[in-house]
Image (cartoon, rainbow, N blue to C red):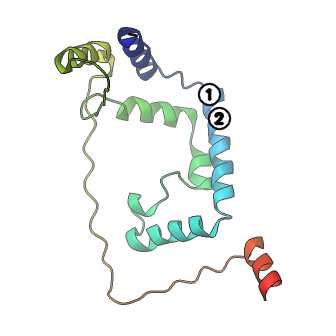
Amino acid sequence: KYEDETLKLLAGLLEDPGLRDSDIERKRADQVAEIKSAMEQPGYTAGINFGKELFGDTPYGHPTEGSVDSVARLTSNDVRNFYRDYYKMDGAIIAVTGDVDADQIKAKLENEFAGLKGTVPAESAPQAPAVASGIHVKVIDRDVAQAKEFFAKHG
């Protein structure tokens, strides 16, 4: 029922997402706080260290949400430039559900999203990690309240 209006609204948001400095600064501070909070969780710390051990200093060896330092260094222009360079229609996948005709909806999408034309450079696939056979143990020594409370109650 609202197909045309919805596509127009979505295209407008994708073509001009608003990315205001104040919004980016607020989200950056939120992200830093979330990462700091997650760092208190043993599972998060184990996952981050596992990625580093497996993939080293490659993009796959870094947390997808960033680190406190990497997120804190982001500027509003970094965010806007990333959006401009990587939010393109070539290679995008758009899923549409509902009672629509595939050819008609494709034509509408191509028309509404014409402002997002362009390509994104292909990324090379990561090399398969070299993992030595056998069991590998890495102890991560952390001074966290959870471990202290557990041992105080059960020790």
Q: Dots 1 and 2: beta carbons under 8 Å?
A: yes
Amino acid type, callout 2: Glu
Vertical side of 152 occupied by 60: above or below: above
Q: CA distance from mark 1 to mark 2?
A: 6 Å
Q: Quadrant of residue 1?
A: top left
- Identify the residue under disc 2: 25
Which residue is pictured at 24% across the width and 44% down the height? 122
In terms of secondary structure, where does tag 2 sit?
helix
Considering depth in this image, is 128 or 7 the residue closer to the camera?
7
The image quadrant where one finds the C terminus is bottom right
Which residue is pictured at 40% across the width and 72% down the height? 54
Vertical side of 74 occupied by 61: above or below: below
Which residue is pictured at 25% across the width and 56% down the height? 125
**Residue 10 spot, x, y in % from top left:** 42, 19
Q: Which mark is residue 127?
A: none
Amino acid type, callout 1: Asp
Considering depth in this image, is 134 or 129 the residue closer to the camera?
134
Would residue 145 be found to the left or right of residue 40 on screen? Answer: right
Q: Quadrant of residue 146?
A: bottom right
Vertical side of 6 occupied by 27: above or below: below
**Residue 126 spot, x, y in % from top left:** 29, 61
Which residue is pictured at 36% across the width and 13% down the height? 3
